[in-house]
Amino acid sequence: MITTKTEISPAAAFVLYSSWPFFAVYCKSSIFPVRFPSVGEGFFKSETLRCGIILPGNQNPQQRSLSVKTEAKIRLLSLVGILFITIFPLIVNSIYLFAGGKSSSHPNFIYSLLWEALSLSLLYFVLHKQGRSLKDIGFEFRKTDIFHGLLLYLALYFVVIIAITISPSFLQAPQNVDFLRTKMTVSYLAFIVINPFFEELIVRAYTMTELNFLIKKEELTVLASTIIQTSYHLYQGLIPALYTGIIFFVFSIYFAKTRKIVPVILVHLLMDLTAISQLGKS
């Protein structure tokens, strides 16, 4: 499930690179009384504001309710901002190619690598300013993750077999993937490795965690994550995109039930490597 070629326009690149000052100012906003916590302060040990989020220490119910509402607003704004900056350009580019637009036959994997690395850095920055970490969205390596990854891969294998049996058209070859038919370079390999982290941490782990906090409906978080991820694979064609959508749906269900993203990343990486290997033989 390699993402689209990430051939983002200079304007889109400017949005990403210039977003840092916005988040820096946003996270030091003086709209509320702010006291950033000292080292060692826990999440609920003082009335604090991190990136606009009031941490409810010894507050009365009314203050605590206000804190929760404030946190919800800040997390919603952060979610929309991150998705708009990091994912929306991919969706636009994918729809453009899906509609028949032309793309360059000479991919710049260094640029793609930089884009995804900066996007992940932005995610880390926002979580850090909110007093959270990647661990809070399910990114924590455990000894059982490889075993879970194998089980997830087997489950996907049977789901794919069933899907192909029901509709053989899912075997339709994807379009606009010639940029992957190139010799392996260091930048290409690095892109392949970082891409599953980029997709799964932002569109799955972070998005589903935030939506679950905001709307508290698991089925909607699963659906939203699947739709977003499928949308920027439309450049491959409708049927191939729907095929990958089935895989993303299984990923989303697994994460919703386990809150573990590392096994999903491992399986995503394995499937990308398999797909690229097959493209090289075609």
Image (tube, rainbow, N blue to C red):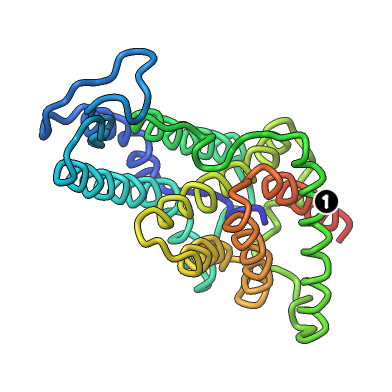
Residue 170 place in picture, x, y as percent? 74, 78
Which residue sits at x=51%, y=49%? 7
Query: Relative to 135, is 27 on the left or the right?
Result: left
Quadrant of the snapshot with the C terminus: bottom right
- Relative to the observer, which residue lies in front, 276 or 20? 20
Q: What element carries label 1?
A: helix
Report the amino acid beneath label 1: Leu
Q: Which of 143 and 22 is in front in this view?
A: 143
Q: At which x and y percent is residue 196?
A: 64, 45
- Is residue 278 positioned above or below 108 on the image? below
Residue 156: x and y, percent? 77, 64
Q: Quadrant of residue 177?
A: bottom right
Residue at label 1?
Answer: 150
Label count reads: 1
Compared with residue 219, is residue 33 higher up or lower down, i.e. above or below?
above
Quadrant where the N terminus is found in the figure: bottom right
